[in-house]
Image: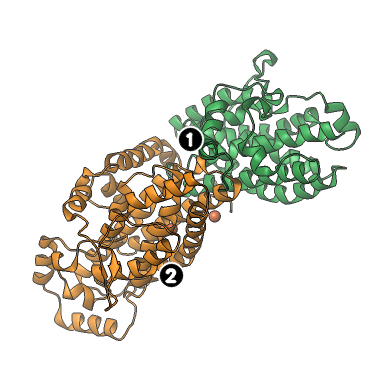
Chain colours: A green, B orange
Amino acid sequence: MSNALKDLLFKMADDALIIGHRNSEWTGIGPMLEEDLAFSSMAQDKIGHAQALYKILNEVLGEADADTLAFKREEKQFKCCQLVEQPIGEYDFSIVRQFLFDHAELIRYDMLTQSSFQPLAQLAKKVKGEIKYHVMHADTFVKQLGKGTEESKARMQSSLNYAWHFALGIFEKSEFENELISENIFAGEEELKKRWLEKITPIIEAATLKVPVTDESKIIYGGRKGFHSEYLKPLLDEMCEVVRTDIDAEW
Amino acid sequence: MYGSTNLSEEDAKRMNSTVEDPEKLEAFESRIARGEKIEPQDWMPVEYRKQLIRMIEQHAHSEIVGALPEGTWITRAPNFRRKLALIAKVQDEIGHGQLLYSAAETLGKTREEMLNDLLNGKSKYSNVFNYPAKTWADIAVIGFLVDGAAIVNQVINSKGSYGPYCRALERICYEESFHLKQGHDNVVYLATGTKHQRAILQDAINRWYVPLLHFFGPPDKMSAHSEKLMKWKVKLASNDDMRNQFLDQYVPKIWELDITFPDPNLKKNNDGIWEFSDPDWNEFKRVINGGGPCNAERIAVRKFAEEAGRWVRQALMNPTEKYVVPLA
Ligand SMILES: [Fe+2]
Ligand SMILES: [Fe+2]
Ligand SMILES: [Fe+2]
């Protein structure tokens, strides 16, 4: 059971850390000061979630401490999905990614409040409350920009089309799927994906945008098994730049 | 000099020649003398309004441009604690910008006009942000000493006469006290850390020493005086006084850590006045006028943000949804 749990916690923590990193890149360059502040808040929350998940790995499952797990692992040890690794791009991509990712996060944590693994169930209750605001933020902007000007609508649709097959990669199953379900730890990626589609479809339609057509062969998997896009390695190099200058130092 | 209170010669001349209604002016000045605050709807001299806009606007620009050098280190911060603290800190600075733009708007200039003037060079920001943050130690030194210098300036200005600016500054100073604590903690970790950590700290101090002396503006004997700005409580302390207060508070805290400043003449005299070598005021002028190592880069980043975000702002002109801010 402990390998299944570790796999689940690592992928969630890595997702949160990497999307938090990307969110933080908007600091100082947002389309308006309010959005700098919003992405900065979300970055803090997400990085905080990652830290809390690594802490469970450390305290309950015997892994290294949170700083070591975040700053001293190799690229192939990361289990994040490729959606979160992608560069921030322009604002339309970032907001669409935030929308697709955070809806999945909210549902995932909601499901996890029922988990038989108590430390995670406890954390899920707290995290859910924060992600609710991230989702509200994303919904507002998706609707507003979808219905805004001709340009904003076109940008949103094209980013949605582009992000879509990455987003479906969030739900890549692990080898522990059945075990997680039968042990009542987590109700599974399939269930999560179903609920996610039900939730976001009406919002996309309310934004007068089209839900992209899915082609199973185009879905971008791999992240959960340690296969990443070209963007993760440079991101990690940047994240670990200071640590690596003096690996034994306390910062 | 977050918001510069130094007048150009032209300004100083105009200031002494603009004629105001003597009765109103007298009432205004006696309110200030009694320690009352001036509020947006109150009568105020044309020059008072003008100088305040200039000063608050520069202060606001300093906050958002100041977020840039530190912002580039968020993604590189070496552990969770420092990373979270730095994101929150830079976020605060942008929040300060937002607060100050609102304070300046009460005087009749819109945020958009101010941001345009930042980009077209009509309006300035603090010189100190035209220097690069080269290593992680720069983040420690900025957090401790640049924020420390800013606090000296802001605490003094919060005793000024314009209500909205004073109130904004009070809130800002409260948040700044956390930045200072974090900055000091970061400096102490480096100073008491490995050889490498001490070396990058010393190097950062060496590079920031002169920009920090420049921060408070030219020496009093070199700058255009304005009795009026003092009387109107727009300017509350001289550049030299602020600089001296800063040195007095912070130099001993660095020396304590066995770190030095690159100036053999830096010392406190018996009369409490600090002495230091002349920090090349021509360099200061050169940087203010665009010749610093990062002026072009800072403005280019702000321009990029303005341009890349235009379509978003346009699409939000006719809002149909309620804006939701995620809190952290
Ligand atoms: Fe500030
Ligand atoms: Fe600050
Ligand atoms: Fe915050």
Q: Which residue occupies the foreground of this view, B255 or A83?
A: B255
Q: Which residue occupies the foreground of this view, B16 or B244?
A: B244
Residue found farthest to the right: A182
The structure residue drawn at horizontal position 81% and vertical position 44%, both measured from the top left corner, is A60
* Displayed quadrant of residue A191: top right
Q: Is residue B53 above or below residue B87?
A: below
Pinpoint the chain carrying mark 1: A
The structure residue drawn at horizontal position 73% and vertical position 51%, both measured from the top left corner, is A126
The local secondary structure at tag 1 comes to helix
Label 2 sits on residue: B170
Label 1 sits on residue: A91
Q: Which residue occupies the foreground of this view, A135 or B232?
A: B232
Q: For the residues labelled 1 and 2, say whether their Cβ atoms are less than 8 Å apart.
A: no
Q: Amino acid at mark 1?
A: Tyr
B84 lies left or right of B319: right
Q: Amino acid at mark 2?
A: Glu
